[in-house]
Structure formats: C-alpha cells, structure tokens
Image (spheres, coloured by chain):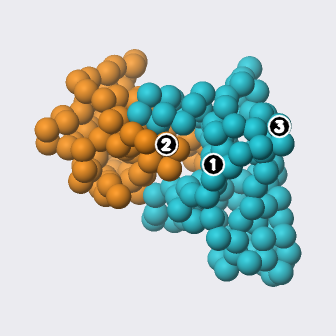
Amino acid sequence: DGGITQSPKYLFRKEGQNVTLSCEQNLNHDAMYWYRQDPGQGLRLIYYSQIVNDFQKGDIAEGYSVSREKKESFPLTVTSAQKNPTAFYLCASSIGIAQWRDTIYFGEGSWLTVV
Amino acid sequence: KNEVEQSPQNLTAQEGEFITINCSYSVGISALHWLQQHPGGGIVSLFMLSSGKKKHGRLIATINIQEKHSSLHITASHPRDSAVYICAVTSGGGADGLTFGKGTHLIIQP
C-alpha cells in the first residue's frame, strides 16, 4: 500500500540536543511538507520541498533544518536553536504543490517532547 | 493571510444524530479541504472542493463561495466518527498557501 511513514512515533529530547524525524513516502509525489501542530492551534508549515535537492522555508522555519536528497525522503532536524520544540509534527506529501488542485496526504505524526 | 474559523470547537452527540461542522474564512479562496484527524494523530483528507457539494458515504461537504463558508455534515453518526475535523483553505499559489483552522473535536457517544 502506498503511504507516508513517519518515525519515531514518540521521541524525547534533552535540552541542547538535535533530533531528526524521519519521513518516507512511496506515493511517487514530488512535493513534501513538514507541519507543526500545537494544542489549540492550526497546523503551521515549517518547510516544504517541491523537488529533490530543493526546499523552502515555511512560516516557522527557525530552529529547524531539512534535506531532500531522495524523492521519497524528507527528514526534519529539530535543532537546539528551536526554543520550544515540544509539539506534534506531521509530514505530508502531494503530487505537486498546487494545493487548490492536489490532494494532500499526511503521515501518522511524531510526538516530540523535550525533557 | 486568510483567517479560518471553525465552529463549534467541541461537539458531543449521540449515535445516529445528524452532525454539522462549520468553517468560515476571510479571503476568497481557490479550494477548501476537509481533513479528519483520528485519535492517534494521523490525518486523512476527506474532501477537496472549490464549489457546490460533494458526498462520500455518510459525509457531505458543501461550500458557498459568496458567503465564504463551508459545512461538513455527517449523517447517521457513529462512535467511529469521533475525531478532530479540520478545515483548510488555499487561495492558490504554492505550498505555503494552505491555512488551517484549529479543528472541531467531535465525540459520538453510543
């Protein structure tokens, strides 16, 4: 079955550590996204990528980094510079970035807690 | 940037009831998405619409472009419909064009 796989589901990070969240898709989609979800707030875009080796900052990119070396993979690194990293992180993909036309598919999400 | 408001924020109903969730937005859009977030956290796309009405099983989504309003209806609701329902809108453009509502938390009691 095609879909998006995120790992790990739950992750604990100590202050000052970088952590990387994995996102893999086998839908052959060009576009991939990372969103952050906080309680009582709508999803906010961290980074997105339209094509391999290209990515763009979203609304809340500070303290995060990404790479897109392969079409299927779009890992997100939460760096120590991110002041408030505890949140739920969702990876998504779509055929293209025309969100007025292309259905967006989401992964199951990753819970990150800073301890 | 578009502002998306959903109502109600929380809704508890009995099994079999007809459910309506509303979404209003402030700026004209190209498309509106209805998403379902199940208790585990994953999100599924239910509908994407730019005009009129769409139906899938017991779910119906409508949009009124002039009034900048959309509704999601669930007929013959069932406990498995319990989830958070999220409205998202886009005015076109690229991947940074989606604006999400805060979601409606629906609980259907048996």
Chain B tint in image: orange
The image shows residue A63, relative to residue B71, as above or below, that is below
The image shows residue A87, relative to residue B81, as above or below, that is below
Give the residue drawn at x 34%, y 28%.
B49
Q: Are marks 1 and 2 in contact (CB under 8 Å)?
A: yes
- Determine which residue is flagged by label 2: B94
Give the residue drawn at x 18%, y 34%.
B64
Quarter of the rendering containing residue B66:
top left
- Determine which residue is flagged by label 3: A70
Residue closest to the eye, A60 or B52: A60
Residue closest to the eye, B7 or A48: A48
Q: Subunit of mark 1?
A: A
- Mark before the other along the chain sequence, 3 or 1: 1
Type of amino acid under label 2: Gly
The quarter of the image holding the N terminus of chain A is: top right
- Determine which residue is flagged by label 1: A48
Mark 1 → mark 2, Cα distance in angstroms: 10 Å
The image position of residue A91, as x and y in percent, is 66, 46
Quarter of the rendering containing residue B77:
top left
Residue closest to the eye, B13 or B7: B7
- Judge if badges 1 and 2 mark residues of a common chain: no
The answer to whether one can see residue A60 in this image is: yes
Chain A tint in image: cyan
Question: Which element is circle 2 on?
Answer: loop
Type of amino acid under label 3: Lys
How packed mark 1 is, by other alpha carbons closer than 10 Å (few <14, some 14-19, many 20 or more), is: many
The image position of residue B25, as x and y in percent, is 26, 50
Q: Are marks 3 and 1 in contact (CB under 8 Å)?
A: no
